[in-house]
Image: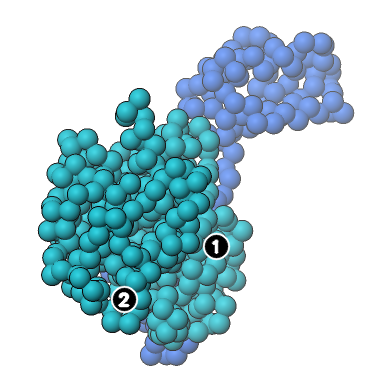
């Protein structure tokens, strides 16, 4: 998981290295560091470190170690980046209640249908839709696609998934 | 090298053309003197210990469509020819049958038992009985090569087994059927319905009179099984593949995909033990988005990362590039054995 750590360091040489050591010690992968030198207050300088850690346990260990070294952690929170998956649906999409299909998808926690583009060549013929689905994390993509497969089976629709989904 | 050719259709006749054109250069460059000692088709067998006159055989086929019309041809089946005529290699190029694997399967097994190396373009038997064929070849100490069975001229098996031999292949994804790629590409460019594009492909000879083998994903699934078994060491069979074809893809669906930055392609995918053939959305700038009747495959490997190969997946002449490379490979294997 990706975590943003707001850390406050003493403005003396060697502090940044001291702050980064515990992160690598507990298997954290540093993605970026923002050093806010213009925001120095009372001899302390705030920095923002974005890291990837394996678990909450490791994150706790990192914070404890930092505090032992007199480094304040003012904020630590998981960075949630939304991911978008695109699928194509074909079949009687409107007749099988598109509204209901969207509602059923939106019922899943962390999943939201963000956009639907529809093509209906003729009221009697099968229609097609391109659906953009936003998921709160990568793991949710599979949950969303599995549910969509279920709905498609019930409504006799064909789901065409994107290659990126599993690439 | 004494070679028997079983099956004298598209691929077999292509081989005759290629040998007439390149026979001398193969001798000069590789020391490979390929002598076709017999040709069999469904009507009979032509045999000549000094080498069958390939030009004449092609003429007879052009005029009559039946090999039995070749002067001196016998009413001998392919299987009998394999059992009775002395040769080093059998090239099995009969029509593929994915339900029973026959007659190709019996031809290949009989050839191996006769201690003859086998080269084939025939997918059916491999998709059904890969392990059996491989173990029979090993037991009889002969080579079993089938580059032409997947991807036509695209050297997909040799790439994985030779050039990426130190890598572990984790997944393979690609377009393994040129006909469906042609149809989907035309549907995108022309915005024409599936039926009309299919008819056009049939008129051009790109799609068969019975197109189900291609458009229902059966051909892709057979090739996927071969790749999973030969490259990833799986023990997969045709029945293990989840298959969805392209019959219900509409031009509107393709248009919507394009507006979202995607092309629709029939993709074969083997990832771990999962084998699937289905239409998929491929980003327009993705290496798998190739047009026309081309084939393409991406290997996902542990060391090299992703490696992609593109080439002509069919064609009477082109596919024989794969058969030649297999024959040259057998020549090399024999030399190594002797040393």
Q: Position of residue B24 (x, y in %)?
A: 47, 53
Total labels drawn: 2
The image quadrant of residue B215 is bottom left
The image quadrant of residue B81 is bottom left
**Label 1: which residue?**
B290
Q: For marks 2 and 1, give the one nearer the viewer.
A: 2
Nearer to us in this view, B9 or B66? B66
In the figure, B72 relative to B113: above or below? below
Nearer to us in this view, B248 or A26? B248
| Chain of the residue under label 2 | B
Nearer to us in this view, B127 or A55? B127
Nearer to us in this view, B56 or B166? B56
Disc 2, disc 1: CB below 8 Å? Answer: no
Chain B: give its colour: cyan
**Label 2: which residue?**
B61
Q: Residues within 10 Å of mark 1 (few under 14, many from 20)?
A: many
Q: Residue at x 29, y 67 (%)?
A: B8
Q: Position of residue A40 (x, y in %)?
A: 84, 23
Q: How is the image coloured?
A: by chain
In the figure, A20 relative to A116: above or below? above
Chain A: give its colour: blue
Q: Position of residue B149 (x, y in %)?
A: 34, 56
User: Where the C terminus of chain B falls, by quadrant?
Assistant: top left
| Residue A41 can be seen, yes or no | yes
Q: Residue at x 52, y 72 (%)?
A: B185
Q: Residues within 10 Å of mark 2 (few under 14, many from 20)?
A: some
Horizontal placement of A102 versus A13: left or right?
left
């Amino acid at each position: 998981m990706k975590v943003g750590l707001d850390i406050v360091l003493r403005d003396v040489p060697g502090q940044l290295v001291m702050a980064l050591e515990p992160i690598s010690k507990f298997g954290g992968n540093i993605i970026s560091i923002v050093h806010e030198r213009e925001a120095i207050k009372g001899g302390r300088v705030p920095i923002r470190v974005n890291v990837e850690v394996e678990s909450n346990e490791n994150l706790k260990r990192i914070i404890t170690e930092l505090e032992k070294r007199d480094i304040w952690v003012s904020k630590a929170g998981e960075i949630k980046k939304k991911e978008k998956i695109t699928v194509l649906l074909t079949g009687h999409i409107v007749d099988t209640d598109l509204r209901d299909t969207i509602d059923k998808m939106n019922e899943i926690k962390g999943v939201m249908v963000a956009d639907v583009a529809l093509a209906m060549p003729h009221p009697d013929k099968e229609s097609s839709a391109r659906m953009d689905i936003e998921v709160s994390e990568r793991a949710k993509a599979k949950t969303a696609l599995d549910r969509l497969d279920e709905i498609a089976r019930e409504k006799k629709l064909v789901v065409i998934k994107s290659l990126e989904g599993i690439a | 090298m004494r070679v028997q050719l079983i099956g004298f259709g598209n691929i077999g006749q292509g081989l005759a053309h290629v040998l007439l054109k390149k026979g001398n250069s193969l001798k000069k460059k590789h020391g490979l003197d390929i002598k076709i000692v017999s040709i069999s088709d469904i009507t009979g067998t032509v045999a000549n210990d000094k080498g069958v006159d390939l030009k004449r055989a092609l003429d007879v086929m052009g005029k009559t469509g039946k090999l039995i019309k070749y002067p001196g041809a016998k009413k001998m089946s392919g299987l009998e020819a394999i059992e009775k005529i002395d040769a080093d290699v059998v090239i099995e190029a009969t029509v593929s049958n994915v339900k029973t694997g026959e007659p190709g399967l019996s031809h290949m097994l009989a050839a191996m038992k006769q201690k003859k190396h086998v080269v084939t373009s025939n997918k059916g038997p491999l998709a059904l009985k890969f392990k059996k064929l491989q173990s029979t070849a090993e037991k009889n100490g002969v080579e079993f090569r089938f580059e032409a069975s997947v991807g036509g001229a695209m050297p997909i098996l040799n790439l994985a087994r030779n050039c990426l031999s130190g890598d572990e292949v984790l997944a393979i994804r690609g377009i393994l059927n040129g006909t469906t790629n042609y149809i989907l590409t035309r549907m995108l460019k022309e915005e024409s319905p599936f039926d009309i594009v299919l008819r056009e492909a049939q008129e051009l000879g790109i799609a068969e009179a019975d197109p189900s083998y291609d458009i229902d994903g059966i051909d892709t699934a057979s090739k996927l099984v071969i790749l999973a078994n030969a490259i990833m060491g799986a023990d997969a069979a045709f029945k293990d593949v989840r298959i969805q074809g392209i019959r219900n893809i509409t031009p509107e669906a393709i248009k919507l995909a394009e507006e979202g930055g995607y092309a629709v392609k029939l993709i074969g995918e083997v990832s771990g033990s999962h084998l699937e053939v289905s239409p998929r959305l491929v980003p327009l700038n993705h290496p798998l988005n190739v047009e026309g009747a081309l084939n393409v495959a991406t290997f996902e490997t542990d060391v090299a990362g992703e490696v992609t190969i593109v080439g002509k997946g069919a064609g009477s002449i082109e596919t024989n590039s794969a058969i030649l490379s297999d024959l040259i490979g057998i020549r090399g294997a024999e030399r190594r054995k002797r040393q």
